[in-house]
Amino acid sequence: MSADLDCRTCGACCVNLPSNRAQGFGYWVEISGDDKILGRRDLVKKHVVYDPSGVPHLKLAHDGQCLGLRGEVGREVTCGIYHSRPTPCRRVEPGDDHCLRSRAAHGLAV
Ligand code: SF4
Ligand code: SF4
């Protein structure tokens, strides 16, 4: 089934799950110290937020969506910082557990 999943018409994993937000988890994708986004001052200013422990994460809009995401989830999306996206964004694979949970949370077919 994963071969049928097209990230360009999805974007579900680029949104903090509503269940996380309901539990008060307001941060989403964690950025590693060696992720190159941290070397781009312009991107840090626009896309990075630090949690109370000082760990960097991708900044989210009020609806939980990554600020890097362009388009509409479940229809047509692109990553506006694709070449500088952090490690967790590179690891998620269409059809893996995280993908399927994210899609299900957005009512998308799995
Ligand atoms: S949830 Fe899965 S199909 Fe959707 S963008 Fe993420 S990896 Fe791609
Ligand atoms: S940086 Fe790109 S791939 Fe990563 S969560 Fe944001 S929009 Fe999605």
Image (tube, rainbow, N blue to C red):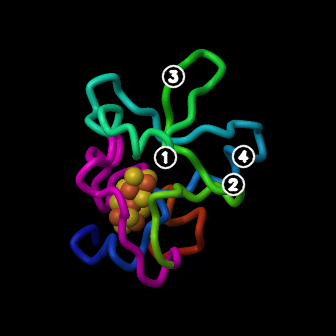
Whether residue 31 is visible here, answered yes or no, is yes
Residue 21, label in figure: 4
The answer to whether marks 2 and 4 mark residues whose Cβ atoms lie closer than 8 Å is yes
> Does mark 2's beta carbon lie closer than 8 Å to ligand 1?
no
Boundaries of the magenta span = 72-100
Image-based side of 3 in relation to 29, left or right: left
Which mark lies nearer to you, 1 or 3?
1
Of the residues tagged 1 and 4, which is closer to the observer?
1
Residue drawn 40% across the image and 46% down it? 43
Q: Is mark 1 within 8 Å of ligand 2?
A: yes
Question: Is 37 situated left or right of 66 in this image?
Answer: left
Question: Which disc, if any, is residue 31?
Answer: none
Residue sticking out furthest to the front = 42
Question: For mark 2, what is the residue?
Answer: 18
Residue shown at the point (37%, 63%) measured from the top left: 80
Q: Quadrant of residue 77?
A: bottom left
* Residue 91, magenta (yes or no): yes
- Which quadrant is the N terminus positioned in? bottom left
Nearer-N-terminus badge (2/3): 2
Residue identified by numbered label 1: 47
Q: In the image, residue 84 lies at what x, y percent?
A: 28, 47
Q: Are marks 1 and 4 in contact (CB under 8 Å)?
A: no
102 and 53: which is toward the camera: 53
Are dots 4 and 3 in contact, CB under 8 Å?
no
Q: Residue furthest bottom?
A: 75
Q: Which residue is mark 3?
A: 55
Measured in 3D between alpha carbons, the distance from the residue under mark 1 to the one under mark 2, in whole angstroms, is 20 Å
Distance Cα–Cα, label 2 vs label 4: 5 Å
